[in-house]
Image (tube, rainbow, N blue to C red):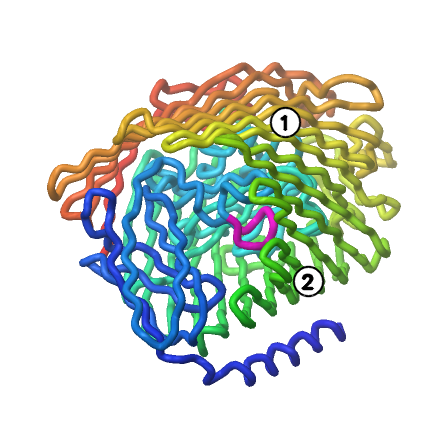
Amino acid sequence: MKVIISGYIMVIMMVMATLGLSGQNTISGVVRGSGGETLAGAHIIIKNTTLGTASDALGQYRLKGLRNGVYTLRVSYFGYQTQEREVELSGREVVLDFEMEETSVDLNAVVVTGTRTEKSLSNTPVLTQSVGIRELVSRDATDITQALEMVVPGMEFASTAAGKSLTLQGIDPQYTVFLVDGERIAGDTYGDIDYSRINMADVERIEVVKGAGSTLYGSNALGGVVNIITRTPSEVARHSASARFSGYNTQNYQLSSGMKWGRISSQTSVVMDKTEGYDLLKGNTYRTQEREDAVVVNQKLRYTFSPEFLVEGKLSYMDKNHDNTAEQLYDRNNRNLTWGARATWFPGFKNDLTLSWHSDHYELFNKITPDSLVNDYDNRYNNARLLGNFRLAEWNLLTVGTEYIQETLTAARNNIAEKNNSDYILFAQEDLQATDNLNFTGGFRAHHNSLYGWHFTPQVSAMYHIWHFTFRGNYGLGYKTPTLKEKYMSYKLPVPGPPMYLLGNEDLKPEDSRFASLSMEYTRKGVSFSVSAFHNDISGMITEDLDEYNVKPGGIIEYTYRNYDHVTVRGIDVLLKTKVFRDLLFTGALSFSKKYDEIDNKAFDNVRNFTGKFNADYRLTAGDYGVNVNLQSNLYGKKKLNLMDDRTHQTTVVDLERFSLWKLTTTHTFISHYYLKAGIDNIFDYTDPSGGYNTGTPGRQFFLGIGVNF
């Protein structure tokens, strides 16, 4: 705690020292395409400062308020290669025009998740997949599960009684960390967060990094990290609204409003969802999409004191209602309140220091009567962080930080009464550019948990460029402490027959992992192709022990969590993105993986070993009319599933077949601002003979949407 207090004092002193130091240098210019056309809405920022803007309707931009010195301007625009150029300011106005080059793969696009520092896609030593919001809109991704399942190899969301459940490269959801702007999300059910919380109207891009990320992101990040980056306004005003309708009275409404007045910017987003639901297996209430409605509101405010210092504040609120048709389950009300603040200081041209506070409060209520709510689950998560990036030399970037994390859980449904868990963390990372073509990154995390003491996790990466090829190698140790539920819960399973309980285990030990990956990426104008091989060795994996149970008086059956030692997951991912010709873009992703039980020396058969994702996107513009035709195909390999009979509790094995799902989306744009969206989901009307254990689709659905951007 002393470290955090000292950090606050240091930032305050820095602010006082920097206010009023800015000068009156001005940079202006025009952003054009390769054909000479002006580009409105291009993003222009000055790196390592708070300054940024967007080009106007004539492609013009203007930035002022900088002191003398050498700066780097970054210009980005969808469908064009991001550019960076240096400029020296010495008291005179500088005119700097940009001619952007069209591309299907923006190798200079900036990502932050792999190293917690800004890196272009081509120069990050950790292979990162970045998906922009325009790509998701063209594919009609209305929620985060659709967005990820469409584009990330090896990622799948299955339908369960509790909602959507994630698997990534064959391992369970509790090993993948979900972040919003680098901050964790509270509340989980069997490792899955409430994915309804992600406000798609607020998303700028999604970054995905696979493999152990415990050095930078702490416990749970053994399988991967998904980071949702939200919008920051760069224009005076930018607004959008849309509505989408499909079968089963499923509706989606999105509103987004971004504004910038001088030093103040505001981004407001609202999403409203509802569905009447449908049955996946007749007579089985646990294979049903229940009736739901949800509202999510996000607000972000940003104030720039000077080119060297800014503060940001965020607030998010969700309210969701969920009806349960099962007699033994109450209807639900889910609520979430998230807020946070961040202050960033840029000392000099190459350094930055950020102090942040993040608080997340997630609650579930049982509707005992329509007017009576009883709290059934209350999870609070607080996180303070001080993070600095320091350019010690042109070839040396040092990242250091400290964190304090506190989690509190009270859950009547799990018989947990206010259990707490605290972590104190120090981490450091060194980024060394050995030559123009060779980069090394290494770091470690010292993690003190209030229940398990100290733990250390190192990680190293290397990247080498030659011709059009980039080779990457990563090795890291992962670390995951047992969750409060895994340690303390006593949960009665809502199934017919004799009472069944899942019990926590206070003797659980932390899980460890060793992750290694090698990748090769080939990139040229209009083409990006990569192959990545990985090996993840998890020791002490925590799992529900369904093979052994205790029978208590009255026929009560008790299962417990235990450490299972040990499991390995290995596989290969293949990614291709290429422009077939100017207006047609093709992307494809294949994932092959195997999950092994190293104790019994056999592969798990309840894991899907193959997934494939393919997409063709065609755009055509003629005057004030534009059309976008998008064809999406997801392929899934077979797997087995162990099912327990609700009454006899006997386990049977069900074979789940291979299948594919196809989706066609057409978007028609008028006068640049208005659009009509129409399409077919599940074109070939695939229905799952298992009743939803293989996929949650109810069959072919038509959808229609309208929207406006202005």
Q: Mark 1 points at which residue?
A: 533
> Which sits earlier in the primary sequence, circle 2 or circle 1?
2
- Residue 401: assigned label: 2
Amino acid carrying label 1: it is Ala
Amino acid carrying label 2: it is Gly
Task: List x then y, in percent, for residue 99.
Answer: 28, 49
Position of 432 compared to 675: left or right? right
Mark 2 secondary-structure assignment: strand
Residue drawn 42% across and 51% down?
203
Position of 411 compared to 675: left or right? right
Where is residue 572, by image quadrant?
A: top right
Task: Classify 10 Å Cα crowding around label 1: few (below 14), some (14-19), many (20 and above).
Answer: some
Residue drawn 50% across and 60% down?
371
Position of 621 compared to 551: left or right? left
Q: Nearer the viewer, residue 404 or 430?
A: 430
Q: Which of 440 and 454 is in front in this view?
A: 440
Magenta-highlighted residues: 112-119
Asked whether residue 322 is in view, the answer is no
Where is residue 75, by image quadrant?
A: bottom left
Q: Is residue 29 magenta?
A: no
Residue drawn 39% across and 39% down?
141
Task: List x then y, in percent, for residue 332.
Answer: 54, 50
Position of 133 compared to 207: left or right? left
- Residue 457: assigned label: none
Task: List x then y, in percent, for residue 465.
Answer: 55, 36
Asked whether residue 267 is in view, the answer is yes
Task: Classify 10 Å Cα crowding around label 2: few (below 14), some (14-19), many (20 and above).
Answer: some
